[in-house]
Image (cartoon, grey):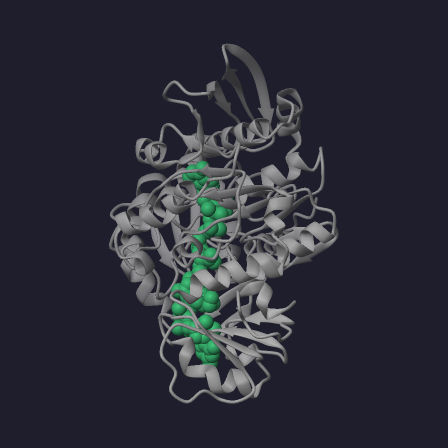
Amino acid sequence: MRLSKLFKNAPTVNVTGLCFDSRKVQKGDLYFCLPGMTYDGHDFIAQAVEKGAIGIVHSKEIENKLEGAVYIRVEDVVLAMNQCARIFYAKPSDKMTMYGITGTNGKSTCANIIKYIRELKEPCGYIGTIAIEYGKVRLAPDLTTPDALFLQKKLSDMVRAGMKSCALEVSSHGLAQHRVDAIRFDVAIFTNFTYDHLDFHGTMDSYFNAKSILFKDLVKENGVSVLNVDDDKFEDLKSLSKARVVTYGMEKECDYRAINVRIDPESTTFDLVYQENIYHVKSSLVAMYNVYNLLACIAALHQTGMDLAIVLQACANIPQIEGRMEQIDCGQPFHVIVDFAHTPDGMEQMLRYGRHIAQNHRVISVFGSAGKRDIAKRKVFGELADQYADLIILTEDDPRDENPKDIACQIKEGIQNTPSVFVEDRYEAIRQAIDNASDGDVILILGKGDEPFMYHTEGRVPWTGDNNCARECLAQAGYTKE
Ligand SMILES: CC(=O)N[C@H]1[C@@H](OP(=O)(O)OP(=O)(O)OC[C@H]2O[C@@H](n3ccc(=O)[nH]c3=O)[C@H](O)[C@@H]2O)O[C@H](CO)[C@@H](O)[C@@H]1O[C@H](C)C(=O)N[C@@H](C)C(=O)N[C@H](CCC(=O)O)C(=O)O
Ligand SMILES: Nc1ncnc2c1ncn2[C@@H]1O[C@H](COP(=O)(O)OP(=O)(O)OP(=O)(O)O)[C@@H](O)[C@H]1O
């Protein structure tokens, strides 16, 4: 593409790619000097030019301009990069129905529900924590919400592969770092807002401000904000939403309301009240929080033209979402559930659900807390497990360069009455939980879900995955039904 298509009055040179990392520049790329938390992209111009960048987009004064590249000075490089990416990749988000999902918990679950149901009508892509998926392509993501350039490129690949819609998880980091600024969403879904990511955002207000960008920036004609009426942040989001607002919930009057909810170990049923009509819904997803996730998706899909009856019927067969409330059934006489819960709210939801289905039997919980992340939540995890569990097995969970035993000690500060042990090796911890379980017990393995890696001192190292680990340990104990 000609540089002048991206910047008015720019010299006639051909841009073959866009890049913001000098280490990855390829010949013909336009290099954007981004401000970062550790570095400043302006410091790497020499490397970018050496690697063949044909243009440098910068905001600071540059004294020694190297030959071989064109220099374009702008006020805001992040803004310029987003605008360029949108044009360079031919505005892919304008060619699909775009669902943006944000909130502390439930983004991956909702995105996967939307993808599954939307695909009954037309091809739908997915970008989020679990995968990047479209058609037959399935890639392992590095981030929940990738950087702006990668995102635009992937969306354009999706359009080329025939996708008509896309469900995209939008993290607060992604919003704060303007990774989705160049995307035009049709629907912005808000799941919930509870404690998380204070290591990055500093305060809950700043965390919320990041989340709210998705709703402030939803300006597409016919755009719709899908909001959880039962969440404390509902009124704030409603008043700042630019688009039409549609509501869902259980406790208050709203557009899509669930009543008569019944949660069983295998399924969930409820009555959906919509415009004074009542529809009976049965879903393969369990736990109360999934009723909220379902309502959000039902509203979003219905508001974007899907037939309500088809959407509701599809709720009965939503496939297992990897590592999210994943029931591992190898024929053992107790429940084993693997879940990605890693926030206080997620932990409480899971522990409460475990308590609900265990009835008089025991809840055995296996978890840790990530190293170098949100230290304050460790004690809270201990308090929650103390409240709901009968046995707590503390173990490693992405310790990074912290000692897992120290993290476990901080979790233990919240444990008063419930027996707890520390088993550093996660595989061994899961094995001990399984060996310890009696008929009817519920084992909750929390925090990592399906993730096939663990962060240690040496970086990201392969991990069996909690779900695979549980299956292996069950097989070793003689249960092999799956
Ligand atoms: C905290 C955070 O989000 N950091 C992101 C941020 O890094 P940064 O600000 O430190 O960047 P930097 O290293 O200072 O570099 C500044 C600029 O100089 C450039 N550079 C740097 C060095 C060099 O040699 N050459 C060069 O060109 C960099 O490419 C960058 O453009 O900008 C980088 C470039 O886009 C991101 O890769 C990086 O994500 C890191 C890897 C990360 O782990 N982010 C996580 C926390 C994250 O975003 N998570 C969310 C939420 C997940 C959840 O809900 O749990 C997600 O969406 O995944
Ligand atoms: N609506 C919800 N309310 C509260 N907790 C939820 C909700 N949905 C899911 N959870 C809990 O949060 C965990 C993570 O769910 P999910 O992966 O869907 O969220 P997420 O927002 O995508 O998280 P992340 O961005 O960290 O991947 C689940 O495993 C479950 O324990």
Return the residue nearer the eye: 223 or 72.
72
Left or right, 357 with reference to 309: left
Return the residue nearer the eye: 186 or 99.
186
Left or right, 345 with reference to 28: left
Answer whether residue 407 is visible to the viewer in this image. Answer: yes
Give the residue at x 65% y 72%: 16
Give the residue at x 63% y 77%: 28
* Quadrant holding the N terminus: bottom right
Residue 376 percent location from the top left of the image: 27, 56
Give the residue at x 28% y 46%: 383
Left or right, 49 with reference to 346: right
Residue 409 percent location from the top left of the image: 29, 61
Q: How many marks?
A: 0
Left or right, 417 with reference to 471: left
Residue 319 percent location from the top left of the image: 65, 38
Task: Answer with the quarter of the image where residue 473 lies.
Answer: bottom right
Residue 182 percent location from the top left of the image: 51, 53
Return the residue nearer the eye: 349 or 116.
116
Answer whether residue 374 is visible to the viewer in this image. Answer: no
* Quadrant holding the C terminus: top right
Position of 142 relative to 67 (above/below): above
Position of 66 relative to 330 (above/below): below
Return the residue nearer the eye: 105 or 328.
105
Position of 51 relative to 86 (above/below): below
- In the displayed orientation, state which residue is furthest to the top: 276
